[in-house]
């Protein structure tokens, strides 16, 4: 887990090592244990290191292998690197370190860009081939590790964070109106390649981009589960599916214990994180550190779920850390959480994760977390309504349940100069839902959530907030083999009990009944949910700042109305419009845009 950066030029000029150095320095928090730069003609690479596997300097990056003519920078973890190393040794490769980075370099030499199909893990990497001048960028199947790119025809730059690209300079920071449409429609996230800034794009998940020395490039998508029933599962009944999910999840949790440092668990007290603790206990893990966070109640909302996290911690005898955050610290920590975002993320979970990660990093360097289970096993409220509709009505049902605002309503919210004429967000969803495969409406939406929405909400949240404190977050529910199994699972088994039914059944033998059958919870941050007092002042200041007035993203009368009467600002999904608009401006101003 680290931060990578780089530049490749196509105009005959040498790469600017100073620019790459600035981008690398901007990611100090992601890699507090070391840094490195490498240059060769048109290419320069940079890296910040967080030591997790092979703590020696032999594993430092950028990692150059002169015998193979390859240099790589890598962010993430290959959980099966030991098995791959033995296979490569059998093919005659010799190793100078015990790192997964060196396995990546040798695997790339042995299998080319197809090496990604052999990797089990989370990763973003860049590999430069000196002989051909070719650069290969790649991202893991679920987009757990980020990779941002920016180019102008003469050169391409890339980095693990968007702010790192901004630190390099020469980025078009105009607002992308299509991305703004997405932000206002999709719970404040911008899925796919776009970002809120016109000059920055993301490499999509499960994608390899091959960039030639002349600047031409091609993308290859190497993973795309069909979300259909497979022949090998025809004879399976509900009990067989329960056992298969249990076994696959246990293997995913076990995989994510690979490290040369201790691994803990973020224990919210919900089903997802609790079953991870249970699986580790089943594996014989002793002295497991678990961490829970809570806040003071506000507006009638409880600020913690300690009742459940304590129950799980006591049941399995973990070394449990209960962390209660004072409102004063929440207020002072909010700007830091916003600065840590690679893109604006409106979820209150971000602030909670940021503060939790700060505390956890005092104890461990790696944690497992339960993110992704709701998308993979149909845990959200918008999934059950899809069970009763035909495949061709998936869009209408999903839009009604999920969209914050229909296209026609945005004209009263977004300023005219930032509006787009077409329903670009609806078209994105129609296109994805209309792809071949995915037998039912629910299958189609689960594929959409997994392939498009998931990387840019809970996954990005975990990466940004943990890495802001040099903490590596691992997500076993996003193990690609578990996701493939869940994709093939009959939809009705996932929807039992209001959602995640098959996961609940797989957990019953491991967890107390109160945890399995509890109402669905969330990461509560009541003070932010209600945006009162000083929290309201922060939002008001952002929306009325000179930078916000000059930018003019939103209708002035609409914003003034929100500030005067906040109760009218809540959408049907419960997202407070003041926070949605204010957070975007807070992020833009924090980035100096």
Image (cartoon, rainbow, N blue to C red):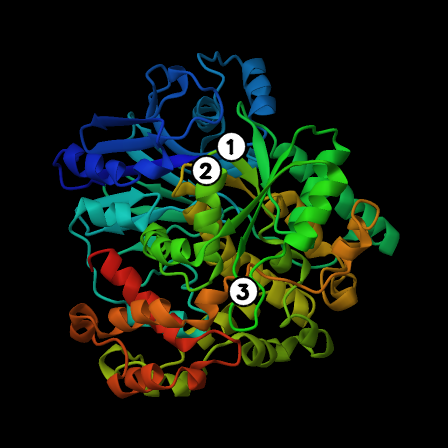
Q: Relative to 567, is 52 above or below?
A: above
Q: Name the mark nearer the viewer: 1 or 2.
A: 1
- Label 2: which residue? 471
Quadrant where the C terminus is found in the figure? bottom left
Give left or right: position of 240 versus 543: right
Q: Which mark is residue 297?
A: 3
Query: Where in the figure is residue 122, as x and y percent of width and height?
Result: 51, 40
Mark 2 surroundings: few (<14), some (14-19) or many (≥20) residues within 10 A? many
Could you classify mark 1 by the number of other residues whose Cα lies within 10 Å: few (under 14), some (14-19), or many (20 or more)? some
- Mark 1 residue element: loop
| CA–CA distance in space, label 2 to label 3 | 28 Å
Chain-order first, disc 1 or disc 2: 1
Q: Nearer the viewer, residue 307 or 377?
A: 307
The residue that appears at 57% across and 32% down in the rendered structure is 263
Tell me where residue 101 appears, x and y as whole percent. 44, 26
- Residue 80 at what x, y percent from top left? 59, 29
Q: Are marks 3 and 1 in contact (CB under 8 Å)?
A: no
Which is more N-terminal, label 1 or label 3? 3
Side of 432 relative to 553 (left or right): right
Q: CA–CA distance between discs 3 and 1?
A: 28 Å
Compare residues 180 and 257 and report the one nearer the observer.
Answer: 257
Secondary structure beneath label 3: loop
Q: Is residue 270 visible?
A: no
User: In percent of the image, x 50 and y 32: which residue is there?
Assistant: 363
* Residue, disc 1: 364
Pointers 1 and 2 in contact (C-beta within 8 Å): yes
Q: Nearer the viewer, mark 3 or mark 1?
A: 3
């Amino acid at each position: 887990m680290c931060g990578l950066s780089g530049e490749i030029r196509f105009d005959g000029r040498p790469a600017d090592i100073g620019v790459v150095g600035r981008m690398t320095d901007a990611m100090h928090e992601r890699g507090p244990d070391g840094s490195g730069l490498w240059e060769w003609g048109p290419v320069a690479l940079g890296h910040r290191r967080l030591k997790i596997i092979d703590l020696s300097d032999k594993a430092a990056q950028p990692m150059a292998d002169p015998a193979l003519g390859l240099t790589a920078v890598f962010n993430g973890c290959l959980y099966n690197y030991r098995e791959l190393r033995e296979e490569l040794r059998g093919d005659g490769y010799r190793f100078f370190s015990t790192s997964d980075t060196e396995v990546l370099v040798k695997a790339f030499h042995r299998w080319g860009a197809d090496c990604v199909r052999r990797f089990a893990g989370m990763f973003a990497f860049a590999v430069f081939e000196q002989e051909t001048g070719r650069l290969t960028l790649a991202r893991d199947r679920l987009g757990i590790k980020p990779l941002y790119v920016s180019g102008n025809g003469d050169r391409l730059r890339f980095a693990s964070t968007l702010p790192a690209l901004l630190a390099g300079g020469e980025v078009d920071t105009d607002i992308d109106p299509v991305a703004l449409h997405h932000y206002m429609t999709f719970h404040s996230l911008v899925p796919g390649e776009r970002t809120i800034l016109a000059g920055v794009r993301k490499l999509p998940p499960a994608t390899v981009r091959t960039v030639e020395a002349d600047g031409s490039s091609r993308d290859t998508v190497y993973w795309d589960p069909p979300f259909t029933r497979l022949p090998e599962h025809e004879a399976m009944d509900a009990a067989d599916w329960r056992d298969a999910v249990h076994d696959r999840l246990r293997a995913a949790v076990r995989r994510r214990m690979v490290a040369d440092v201790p691994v803990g668990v973020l224990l919210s007290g919900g089903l997802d994180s609790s079953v991870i603790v249970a699986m580790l206990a089943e594996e014989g893990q002793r002295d497991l550190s678990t961490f829970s966070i809570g806040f003071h109640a506000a507006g009638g909302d409880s600020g913690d779920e300690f009742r459940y996290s304590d129950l799980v911690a006591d049941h399995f005898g973990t070394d449990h850390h209960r962390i209660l955050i004072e409102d004063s610290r929440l207020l002072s920590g909010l700007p830091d959480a916003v600065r840590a975002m690679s893109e604006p993320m409106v979820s209150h979970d971000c602030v909670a994760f940021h503060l939790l990660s700060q505390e956890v990093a005092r104890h461990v360097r790696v944690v497992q977390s339960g993110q992704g289970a709701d998308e993979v096993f149909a845990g959200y409220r918008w999934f059950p309504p899809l069970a009763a509709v035909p495949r061709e009505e998936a869009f209408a049902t999903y839009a009604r349940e999920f969209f914050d605002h229909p296209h026609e309503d945005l004209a009263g919210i977004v300023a005219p100069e930032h509006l787009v004429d077409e329903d670009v967000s609806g078209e994105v969803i129609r296109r994805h839902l209309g792809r071949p495969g995915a037998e039912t409406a629910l299958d189609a939406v689960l594929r959409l959530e997994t392939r498009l929405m998931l990387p840019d909400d809970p996954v990005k949240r975990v990466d940004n907030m943990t890495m802001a404190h040099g903490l590596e977050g691992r997500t076993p529910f996003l193990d690609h083999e578990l996701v493939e199994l869940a994709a093939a699972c009959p939809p009705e088994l996932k929807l039992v009990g209001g959602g995640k039914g098959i996961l609940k059944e797989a957990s019953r033998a491991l967890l107390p009944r109160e945890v399995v059958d509890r109402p669905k919870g969330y990461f509560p941050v009541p003070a932010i949910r209600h945006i009162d007092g000083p929290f309201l002042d922060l939002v008001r200041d952002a929306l009325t700042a000179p930078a916000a007035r000059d930018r003019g993203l939103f209708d002035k009368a609409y914003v003034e109305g929100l500030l005067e009467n906040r109760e009218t600002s809540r959408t049907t999904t419960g997202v407070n419009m003041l926070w949605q608009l204010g957070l975007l401006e807070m992020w833009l101003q924090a980035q100096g845009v």
